[in-house]
Amino acid sequence: MEKKPFGVTKDGESVGVYCIRNEALAVEIVEYGAVIRSLRVHHGGAWTDAVLGYDTLREYEKNDGYLGACIGRVGNRIGGAAFTLNGKDYRLAGNDGENHLHGGVRGFDKYVWSAEMLPDGVRLTRVSPDGEEGYPGTMCAAVSYRLCGDTLTMAYEASADRDTLCNLTNHSYFNLNGSGSVLGHTLQIGAEEFLENSAATLPTGKRLPVAGTPFDFRAPKRVGQDIGADDIQLRNGGGYDHNFCLTGETAAVLRGDASGITMTVRTTLPGVQLYTANFLTERRGKQGAIYAPRCALCLETQYFPNAMACDGFEKPILRAGDLWRHCTTLTFSGKR
């Protein structure tokens, strides 16, 4: 475990980066946004960086793609940037047309978190004050990143002094080849259903069967196999940008076609958002790499988006005095 300086924010806050490493994985965690800056996998005698990221703090400050960040208070979209809780209406910051996305104008990804070293990782915390981005209650949030063998664990906790909403997730973009297009990767998702989206990529409340559709990833298939199909749901999202309703703990298995690296995603949460970086504008990333649409994909574990407005969806409500606790793990395999 090592901590190094990463820069100073435009507001004058010093930011560090924590380097966690074992024989299988090497991870860099930045205090700004609780970002996973790099996730290097050891295979074939070499190391492959499996996530997108930036070289400098300034690039993260102007980041519009949430690269590697912890998202909160609520990941994904809330329709109309509003919700009703305990009979009271709350108006949130609108930052995605009429909707609220990934915590608002300044979500958790835009703050410096406090960090403490753990024997096998790092724990980051921040306090979100009452009314931040429109949410009720003061919320204390934490995410712990830990390494054990070939597994990275992301453990989330939150508590609040008033009833509020909580749906923490991580927004890493994965490319298990380390570069190039992600469309040749194979993907399997443990879901029989996915959520129908509106033209604004907002769930309508309707679950659709994956069988017989481009959304059927029950058996491994190439990410790009059906992404260009004539399907209204794919047109709405410009590709995959949909929540899959998980049937068990194993959310997804992703395999790099060139590297042979496999990543298995397991979670305690009920859904996972597959996003194929459809709207990631071209930009320069780590070590001069050029990032563009479909150069990576996200697998965001979560409560279903827009759940407060949809009957039958589990609600991401955090009751005052309760502890919100969920866990997502990434396990890597491949020839070493």
Image (tube, helix red, strand yellow):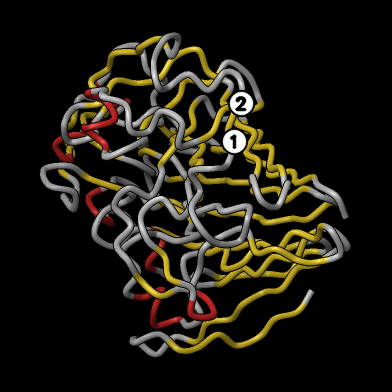
* Position in image of residue 222 (x %, y %): 54, 33
Say if 162 sits above or below 108 in the image.
Answer: above
Residues under labels 2 and 1: Cα distance?
6 Å
Few, some or many C-alpha atoms within 10 Å of disc 1 (few <14, some 14-19, many ≥20)? many
Which residue occupies 44% across, 45% down? 160
User: What number is the disc on residue 186?
Assistant: 1
Q: Nearer the viewer, residue 251 or 70?
A: 251
Image quadrant of residue 275? top left
Q: Kindly identify the amino acid type of the residue bearing the numbered disc 2.
A: Pro
Task: Name the element at disc 2.
Answer: loop
- Mark 1 belongs to which amino acid? Thr
Q: Residue at x 22, y 32 (%)?
A: 235
Q: Position of residue 211 (x, y in %)?
A: 45, 9
Please state if 201 lies on the left or on the right of 286 as rendered: left
Label ID, residue 220: 2
Q: Is residue 34 above or below residue 90?
A: below
| Front residue (pair 11, 58) | 58
Task: Report the residue at 40% width, 85% height from top.
Answer: 9
Q: In the drawing, does residue 63 fall left or right of residue 201?
A: right
- Which quadrant is home to the N terminus? bottom right
Residue at 55 percent of width and 85 percent of height: 6
Label pair 2/1, CB-CB below 8 angstroms: yes
